[in-house]
Image (spheres, rainbow, N blue to C red):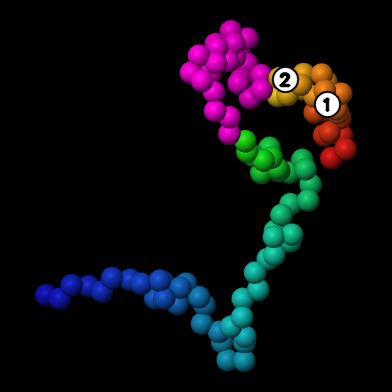
Amino acid sequence: MPKPLKPNLKSIVAASQPIPLHGESSVVRLQTATEAAPQDKAKTTLKQRAKQLSVYLEPPVYDQLRDLAYTERSKIHTLMLEALDMLFTQRGVPSIRELEKRG
């Protein structure tokens, strides 16, 4: 008994495309990024709106931050935002809240 043929990308795409009827165009229009992106801030999540930033911390620093978050029943993210807001105030630049209002 011969082995069944392995599917390839071409056959998968061909099977997923509807066959155009007589006189119909086979061109598919895709949405651009601006059309697909929601414009309303309330309808998007922070993860969709925000930029991600990695921070490398020495283990004792991370442990202390984690312990503070646990003790205060908070999240590390909240403490990091608080620290950034304190830094912005100290340096005389707009706070996070002021930046969000500008939007």
Q: Is residue 62 above or below residue 23?
A: above
Secondary structure, magenta segment, majority class: helix
Residue 66: say if magenta. yes
Q: Which mark is residue 82?
A: 2
Q: Quadrant of the N terminus?
A: bottom left
Residue 91 found in image quarter? top right
Q: Could you tell me the amino acid type at mark 1? A: Ser
- Residue neighbourhood size for the residue with mark 1, other residues' Cα within 10 Å, grouped as few (<14), some (14–19), many (≥20): some
Q: Which mark is residue 84?
A: none
Picture coordinates of residue 45 (x, y %)? 68, 40
Q: CA distance from mark 1 to mark 2?
A: 10 Å
Residue at the image point whose x is 45% and y is 73% from the top: 13
Q: Is residue 28 left or right of residue 89?
A: left
Q: Is residue 15 above or below residue 99?
A: below
Q: Could you tell me the amino acid type at mark 2? A: Glu
Picture coordinates of residue 60 (x, y %)? 50, 14
Residue at the image point whose x is 87% and y is 34% from the top: 101
Instruction: Quickly name the residue at label 1.
Output: 95
**Between residues 81 and 15, which one lies in front from this camera angle?**
81
Residue at the image point whose x is 28% and y is 70% from the top: 6
Mark 2 secondary-structure assignment: helix
Outermost residue on the top side: it is: 71
Mark 1 secondary-structure assignment: loop
Picture coordinates of residue 65 (x, y %)? 58, 15
Residue 70: say if magenta. yes
**Between residues 102 and 45, which one lies in front from this camera angle?**
102
